[in-house]
């Protein structure tokens, strides 16, 4: 079974790269012109999201540099210790919905410090894979298409991140604990 999954994983992208242009030719779609139109739209989108991206990066930097994150972690440490949650991974629960690159850098630091096979490394890796950059998605993508009312999407995204965080810890404790 593992070898079949590995074979499918290795060939899926090359097959898609060949299949999509061939299918477009079959449907008589101008492949190159469609590609260049899409690239132009992508450039316009990238230019539109730059102000949203800069604003979010500034907010994240202020949050970390002000010591607010360390303050929250210090307040919650007794509760986290009581629940058996390593306090080292808690900043990841705060960072992950805000920034993918920042949370990846934090996860990398945790893995360098504690090792990839440590419980902290496993929990951090599982959190990284089971949560999303909710605020980044809302800021950048909703901003790019002009969606102003994102209240329900924000609530659902943050609840999903919380569930992913708790599930990652629970699964790691069950499997590796």
Image (tube, rainbow, N blue to C red):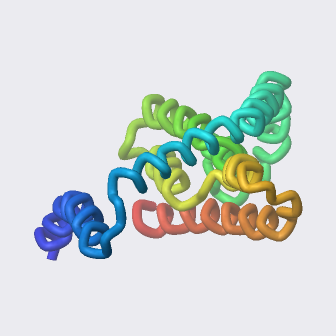
Furthest residue in direction top, as rendered = 65
Q: Could you tell whether 149 is left or right of 163 in the image?
A: right
**Residue 15: x percent and y percent?**
20, 64
**Residue 167: x percent and y percent?**
58, 68
Task: Classify residue 68 by image quadrant.
Answer: top right
Q: Could you tell whether 152 is left or right of 49 in the image?
A: right
**Residue 73: x percent and y percent?**
77, 40
Which of 163 and 32 lies nearest the eye of the viewer? 32
Which of 89 and 50 lies nearest the eye of the viewer? 50
Q: Is residue 142 visible?
A: yes
Q: How many marks?
A: 0
**Residue at coordinates 35% horizontally, 60% vertically from top-left?**
30
**Residue 174: x percent and y percent?**
47, 69
**Residue at coordinates 71% horizontally, 36% vertically from top-left?**
53
**Residue at coordinates 43% horizontally, 46% vertically from top-left?**
36
Instruction: Identify the image quadrant of the C terminus.
Output: bottom left
Which of 77 and 111 lies nearest the eye of the viewer? 111
Instruction: Identify the image quadrant of the N terminus.
Output: bottom left
Q: Is residue 119 visible?
A: no
**Residue at coordinates 45% horizontally, 36% vertically from top-left?**
111
Q: Is residue 162 above or below residue 63?
A: below
């Amino acid at each position: 079974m593992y070898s079949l999954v590995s074979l499918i994983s290795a060939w899926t992208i090359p097959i898609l790269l060949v299949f999509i242009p061939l299918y477009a030719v079959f449907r008589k779609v101008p492949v190159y012109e469609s590609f260049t139109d899409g690239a132009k739209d992508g450039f316009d989108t990238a230019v539109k999201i730059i102000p949203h991206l800069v604003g979010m990066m500034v907010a994240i930097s202020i949050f970390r540099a002000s010591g607010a994150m360390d303050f929250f972690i210090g307040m919650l440490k007794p509760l986290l210790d009581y629940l058996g949650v390593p306090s080292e991974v808690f900043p990841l629960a705060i960072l992950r919905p805000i920034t993918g690159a920042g949370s990846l850098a934090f996860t990398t630091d945790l893995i360098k410090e504690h090792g990839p096979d440590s419980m902290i490394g496993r929990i951090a890796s599982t959190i990284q894979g089971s949560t999303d950059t909710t605020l980044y998605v809302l800021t950048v993508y909703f901003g790019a298409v002009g969606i102003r009312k994102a209240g329900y999407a924000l609530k659902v995204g943050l609840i999903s991140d919380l569930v992913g965080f708790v599930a990652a810890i629970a699964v790691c404790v069950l499997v590796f604990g």
